Image (cartoon, grey):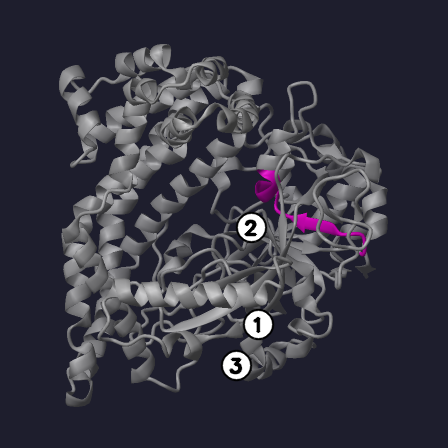
Amino acid sequence: MKKIWIFLLLSVVSITTFADEGMWFLMHLKRLNEADMQKKGLKLTAEEIYSINNSSLKDAIVQFNGGCTAEIVSGQGLVFTNHHCGYGAIAELSTPENDHLTNGFWAKSLTEELKPKSLFVRFFVRMDDVSKRILGLVNNDMSEKEREKIINQEIAKIEKENSEGGKYVVSVKSFYNGNEYYYFVYQDYTDVRLVGTPPNSIGKFGGDTDNWEWPRHTGDFSIFRVYGDKDGNPATYSTENVPLKPKHFLPVSLRGIKEGDFSMILGYPGRTNRWMTAAGIDQNVNYAYPAWVEASKVGMDAMKKHMDKDQAVKLNYASTYSGVANYWKNRQGMIDALTQHNTAATKRKAEAQFQKWANKKANKALYSDVLPTINAYYDATNEKARHDNYLIGMLRSSTFAALPYSLGAALKQYAAANEAKRAEMRPNFENGFTETFENIYLPLEIDVLADELNLYAKKAGNIAPYIDELNKKNGGAFGADVQAAFDKSIFSSSEKLQAFLANPSAEVIDADPLYLISKSLMDKYREKTPEVDALTDKYQAAHRKYIAGVLASNPKGKYYPDANSTLRLTYGTIRALPADSRNDAKINNYTTLKGTIAKYKPNDEEFDLPKRLMELYEAKDYGRYADKEGYMPVNFLSDQDITGGNSGSPVLNGNGELIGLAFDGNIEAMAGDVIFDPKLQRTISVDIRYVLFIIDKFAGAQNIIDELKIVE
């Protein structure tokens, strides 16, 4: 990675806004952001972005399947999101005979749209502040457990009060580590169908090599549709359901982008740790993330060995592999960026200033001991963090690290039930077994579990007791033990589990070799000791007070809370990185189809391209989607503050029109989840003109184009 100089944030309030930093609550835009946004180019009011009583931009933004963002782009419930967000659903709907993941898919009518088994979108209805109500019930003299019990009881009341008898999903969330509380009201739609996707060679062009990199040339989009009943209400899948008529949908702009243009992103950022202290960063860089990276790579290598040999296996494990690979590169990028940018040192300077403030007479009683307590917690849990991340890497890669344990607990209940209850439970088990094993490939699973156990036993330290016993017997070579466990276990096939239902026995579960491995791992994963519990309680109280102290030390600061999968707005400008010889663009804030073609490698898994795309390039047949200078735009850069969960988020111009879909960040700014860098932070988006070009000129899906409100 090239050498990068980072602007050091020397102020204690490193989480206040500099440049375009911030993930803002929509209900606070009028007070905190409206004037600044309008000065930079916003043509809308805060009310047009977030309104409870009238339709607004927020009504077109949905959380996609719990982990990404998407946007409504037509009056018939059409949804745009990233290809990698729809990846699991596309893979599920693919077979070797109808390989939509590899070849793409375009429904030419509503009847051709495909329904995956489980997919939902979540609409945001409203939010409100309940901090006074909740915090008025607790005080600093309470233990963390007492405090948590009282708060959870009040949260349950608030969620019930606002659900309208189950019509809405209500979630009360803690912010600033328990210093503020807000409730969020949502409505979920579960009938969501695949409308279109480019082939993998466009939607995932560049693969793992280009992931988190710039310049980028990826057509990272997919298209779905939301259905409801005839009255527009959520409904389970039915052929009688109709496309949803949304309260608002986004117009699509073909006007393009230029350096310095105002732009904003609405979405559901997953998690940031901007309030993390230096000791927490050190733990991640030196203990947690290296273990995660190593365990992920072991799992990926074991999977890929089998996926490369069989297209059906590749499709069945495509989503799992992609998820593991994404965070494998993410965590390595975090290690590199946090180390190279000396982020912990920057935080320590801020903490030293805070400690001076905390030691003043007026503040000492509340705040002087919070940083020493936080530091003591991390010192005591460094080795545990290493262990836990080796184990987490295994659980993310291996189905059978967790499945026998979770399924075994349910089967024990079945065994203990009377005949009538068993008859009631049995159909659900039978259907579940069939579904679970439908796409499992045992040779892959055996290798993944064995390889992960080899690594875990060798590197994780204080490992699970039963795994330690096996390790001492097999000398750290788990292959034979895992193979024998699969041969003997009832959890290795649907047929064996079906046979168990006819003659159930808890003793059979307890003696099962795969169950013993899985139970040992899961017990260790959930292990709590009095010592760690005590340390955690002290840490949680200290971290809450630390954040309260930072807020109190600069009450005029303009603050935002860490991301936690709640809807936020972030704004900034189209903004280039320094010139890069790898990019043919005149300004290094966009890429072109010419650059895509330059990366082409025939039959390469990551850089192959469809013949049709290259023909369109040779003919310069870009239709109305070309830039006014003649090139076909592909991706572009802006400087908004985003993180995981923002994938698929709409990038909007000052008129609230869609200009792109956010899908990635640049690896130089991978420290961004911990500390915002106003010089390096960039969002990578697919230009909406490239999306429409692929839909129209490449796929010929005019029916989709006709649904959109296109602004030229």
Is residue 76 rendered magenta in the image? yes
Q: Is residue 3 a member of the stretch shown in magenta?
A: no
- For mark 3, what is the residue? 32
> Where is mark 2, residue-wise?
68
Q: Which residue type does callout 1 highlight?
A: Leu
Tell me the number on the disc at residue 26: 1
The image's mark for residue 481 is none
Name the residue located 70 percent from the left edge and 70 percent from the top edge: 56
**Which residues, given as a range, are shown in magenta?**
75-87
Task: Mark yes or no: residue 323 visible.
Answer: yes
Question: What is the distance, in whole Å, between disc 1 and disc 2 at their CAs?
Answer: 18 Å
Residue 117: give x, y in percent of width and height: 63, 34
Tell me the crowding category of disc 2: few under 14, some 14 to 19, or many 20 or more residues within 10 angstroms, Cα based. many
Q: Secondary structure at mark 1?
A: helix
Residue nearest the observer in this picture, 637 or 620: 637
Does residue 21 show up? no
Which quadrant: the C terminus?
A: bottom right
